[in-house]
Amino acid sequence: MSFRFPTVADYAAAYRKHAADPVQVAGRALDAARTLDRMDPPLRTFIALDEADVRRQAEASAMRWSRGAPRSELDGVPVAVKDEYDVAGYGTTCGTAFLGKEPATADALAVARLRAAGAVIFGKTNMSELGLAPSGINPWHGIARNPYDPNRDTGGSSTGSGASVGMGLTPIALGNDGGGSVRIPAAHNGVVGIKGTFGRVPMEGVPILCWSLE
């Protein structure tokens, strides 16, 4: 049995060869995401996912590939985003019940750069409340569960991002890390997680919860 999931390079190669297109990939990912909260227990990987927006992004990407003019290797690749980054049209709750009442009007800079490269921004992933716990437990948005064993947690605080990549739903996801919030979910979900050098990844459009480390 193989647990190898498609990588960004795999998607780009398939699009280039017309073996798949971003609309098909997005549709399959949406179908999979839709089942997560119907499971028993629900996995609670995502707290918000605008299917119409995902499909619009995928259609625009498919048009670029059909013209032979993709923006980058990321064009048409679904990327999940931790709910600590602003994404236009989505609230940014930071895992709380009191933040994110109004949708963001602009993307965080890291998200904007992904979007400019053609990536399909694939919803907002669950996280530990205010990034303060190393587990997948969230009292407001539900317990994010490990896709390999729902009786185990995903690690935190980038809980849903780790699970999304761990189950192969998206090949990459954004998290952030002050004291292990990317590295712990990566370890729990069997994937690679990188904590960038401080200042290397732009934090504009992200509520800074850990000023000197995140």
Image: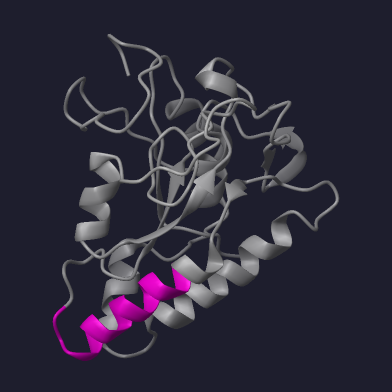
Q: Is residue 60 magenta?
A: yes
Residue at image x 31%, y 27%?
195
Q: State the image coordinates of residue 72 (x, y, percent, origin top left).
A: 17, 66
Left or right side of 41 for 212 = left
- Work out which residue is located at the far top of the displayed protein and give it: 212
Left or right side of 50 for 62 = left
**Magenta segment main secondary structure:** helix
Q: Quadrant of residue 167?
A: bottom right
Q: State the image coordinates of residue 74 (x, y, percent, origin top left).
A: 26, 63
Above or below, 49 against 205 in this view is below
Left or right side of 207 for 27 = right
From which residue to which does the magenta span run? 54-69
Q: Is residue 168 magenta?
A: no
Q: Quadrant of the N terminus?
A: bottom right
84 or 97: nearer the viewer = 97
Left or right side of 131 for 97 = right
Residue at image x 50%, y 26%?
184
Above or below, 134 against 202 in this view is above
Q: State the image coordinates of residue 78 (x, y, percent, origin top left).
A: 41, 62
